[in-house]
Image (cartoon, rainbow, N blue to C red):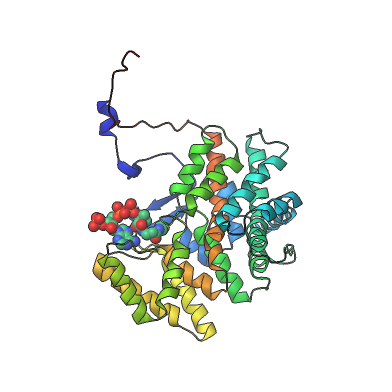
Amino acid sequence: MKTVEKNYSPGLDGVIAAETKISVLDTVESQIIIRGYDLIDLSKKYTYLDIVNLLLLGQLPSKDEKVALENKLKANYAIPYEIIDIFKLLPKDTHPMDGLRTGISSLAGFDPKIDDRSFHTNLERAYKLLGSMPNIVANSYRVLNNQEVVEPDASLSYSANFYYMITGKKPTKTEEEIFDQSLILYSEHEMPNSTFTARVIASTQSDLYGALTGAVASLKGNLHGGANEAVMHMLLEAKTVEGFEKLLKSKLAKKEKIMGFGHRVYMKKMDPRALIMKQALRKLCDAKGDDLLYRMGEAGEAIMKEEKGLYPNLDYYAAPVYYMLGLPIELYTPIFFSSRTAGLCAHVIEQHENNRLFRPRVIYTGERHNVKQA
Ligand code: COA
């Protein structure tokens, strides 16, 4: 009992849960290292598909390898029509994250090699999931909102097709680049709750679909991926810079947590990904000749720094960027999940390749009773 108590850290704060070659948050250098590279540098020079290759295979692809990867994903763009039928059977007020969770979960039944956990089969499964994700996200949302189902357009890049399937419009070059960059920034982030969830599930030798289904449920929460949607609702509720300052101050006075600020690992530092999205927001505001959301963002940042010494995380600036891109607010978290699929698949594969079942202990704070004779 004594050893268990000594090792106890509520929320597993600071606990090392796994060895990994995939990524780490280097808090000393303030860098997010992905397979040896700085994620921020990658996000300025590469595309999402390069990062998918890097995450899954450990290296940036050559030109030919990238084409091969793109073709593999495109071959998986279609999803079984039965999954669209399942979306049609869901109650119309189903949350898009629950639609997404249902879609991913249903894919398992269509996998003839479901019990095969070999590296090669898991990799093919990861390509299937990544290829299907834009279709599942866009069409679960469309069906739930009585919109026409949209077919993927394989003539577009992965990100442009994703954007097109959601909005029904082909993105401009700037929109495509910024959307793609946001997918890179969301693609992998060491051991957040959802990645831990996926690895815990995978550690029982359960399959990739099950691990990702659990991860969607984890990412749905406001303290994790759900924060980007919550940020946008706050900005819309506030309407103006002054309104936003007032809203934040009144929330802080009520000791409420402000969505889009703070981070278990960074906490007192700026999330480097947030800065990239802030720059993207500037670009979009300039292109559209409307800088209200940028000014609101800066005003909120200043208040939180002054009042709480807290800095924005990625969700704080990704939310207004997605708004300026014309994406529906309810899809911000599903989009986050779709991009994170790359990192999650890499983690599940790594867990399957070098597994130790997760099974922690507890400190029992309940009572003990003697069972009396009946
Ligand atoms: N707004 C206001 N105060 C915050 C805060 C926020 N967003 N995040 C942390 N704090 C404060 C807490 O109130 C607490 O203060 P106290 O010590 O005076 O009670 C202190 O900072 C530590 O917070 P705690 O909740 O214990 O840290 P954590 O490691 O459990 O939380 C988060 C990390 C991300 C869950 C937390 O910062 C949060 O809820 N942020 C908002 C949700 C969000 O943006 N999530 C996306 C994360 S990428």
Left or right, 317 with respect to 307, comes to right
Give the vertical position of 215 relative to 257 (above or below): above
Residue 263 visible to the viewer: no
Quadrant assignment for the C terminus: top left
Give the vertical position of 12 relative to 331 (above or below): above
Give the vertical position of 366 relative to 107 (above or below): above
Left or right, 358 with respect to 256, comes to right
Q: Quadrant of residue 10?
A: top left
* Residue at image coords 50%, 59%: 186
The residue nearer to you, when weighing 164 against 40, is 164
Give the vertical position of 106 relative to 324 (above or below): above
Task: Spot the residue most to the front.
Answer: 374
Residue 133 visible to the viewer: yes
**Percent x, y of residue 358:** 45, 33
Q: Quadrant of residue 99?
A: bottom right
**Percent x, y of residue 79:** 72, 52
**Percent x, y of residue 146:** 68, 65
Task: Spot the residue most to the top.
Answer: 373
The residue nearer to you, when weighing 308 against 186, is 308
Left or right, 324 with respect to 311, comes to right
**Percent x, y of residue 366:** 29, 31
* Residue at image coords 45%, 69%: 233
* Residue at image coords 50%, 78%: 283
The residue nearer to you, when weighing 214 against 31, is 214
Left or right, 164 with respect to 95, comes to right
